[in-house]
Amino acid sequence: MYCQFTHLNIKDMTILKNLLAGFAGAVALNLLHEGLKNTSSDMPRIDLVGEEALNKVLGAFGSAIGNDKQLYQATLATDVLSNALYYSLIGAGSSRFITGRAVVSGLSAGLGAVNLPQKMGLDDEPVTKTSKTKILTVAYYLSGALVTAMVLKVLNKN
């Protein structure tokens, strides 16, 4: 099989590295959330906010997902994709500031996840139930961003 990667230029490789690192961060965020969400009643349930948001958007187009398993899967896929694209922006610009951009991006995403749902007409209780829930929500997004930064640093060394 012929490989097209031999014809990628530096800009293409940078974009590819950023997307790969962003994907790693998004997967880390979701593994953290999925692994801990049922361990305590005050753990963040980012998935519930995402499911409500996805069905709200789909409902605006006259379609919603009624099957719980399909809604969960669609939300998870949408979440990984959107977070991967968001986290990939951490790699934009000078490599000297990757960690700083990761911290700012992670904190911004986490604070947005806590503060925006209610403003968007969504139930924010799954991410604002307790102070612990709020702090962990922000920490999850920060963790994903820091994983992205670590992967970028490794990829940039090679």
Image (spheres, rainbow, N blue to C red):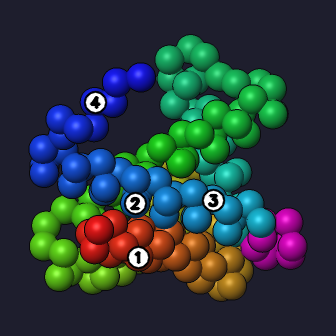
Q: Amino acid at mark 3?
A: Asn
Left or right placement of residue 96 versus residue 16 in this view: left
Distance from Cα at disc 2 to Cα at disc 3: 14 Å
- Please tell me which of labels 3 and 4 falls first in the chain: 4
The picture places residue 17, in percent across and down from the top left corner, at 31, 55
The picture places residue 46, in percent across and down from the top left corner, at 64, 59
Left or right placement of residue 72 versus residue 83 in this view: right
Going 81% across and 34% down the picture, which residue do you hit?
69
Going 85% across and 66% down the picture, which residue do you hit?
38
Query: In the image, which is nearer the foreground, mark 1 or mark 4?
Result: 4
Distance from Cα at disc 3 to Cα at disc 4: 31 Å
Q: Is residue 13 magenta?
A: no
Of 46 and 121, the residue lying toward us: 46
Q: Amino acid at mark 2?
A: Ala
Residue at image mark 4: 4
Query: In which quadrant will I find the N terminus?
Result: top left
Q: Which mark is residue 30?
A: 3
Residue at image mark 1: 150
- Please tell me which of labels 1 and 4 falls first in the chain: 4
Q: Residues within 10 Å of mark 1 (few under 14, many from 20)?
A: some
Q: Residues within 10 Å of mark 3 (few under 14, many from 20)?
A: many
Q: Are marks 3 and 4 in contact (CB under 8 Å)?
A: no
The range drawn in magenta is 36-43
Q: Is residue 40 magenta?
A: yes
Q: Are marks 1 and 3 in contact (CB under 8 Å)?
A: no
85 is higher (above) or lower (below) than 56 = below
Dot 1 falls on a residue whose secondary structure is helix
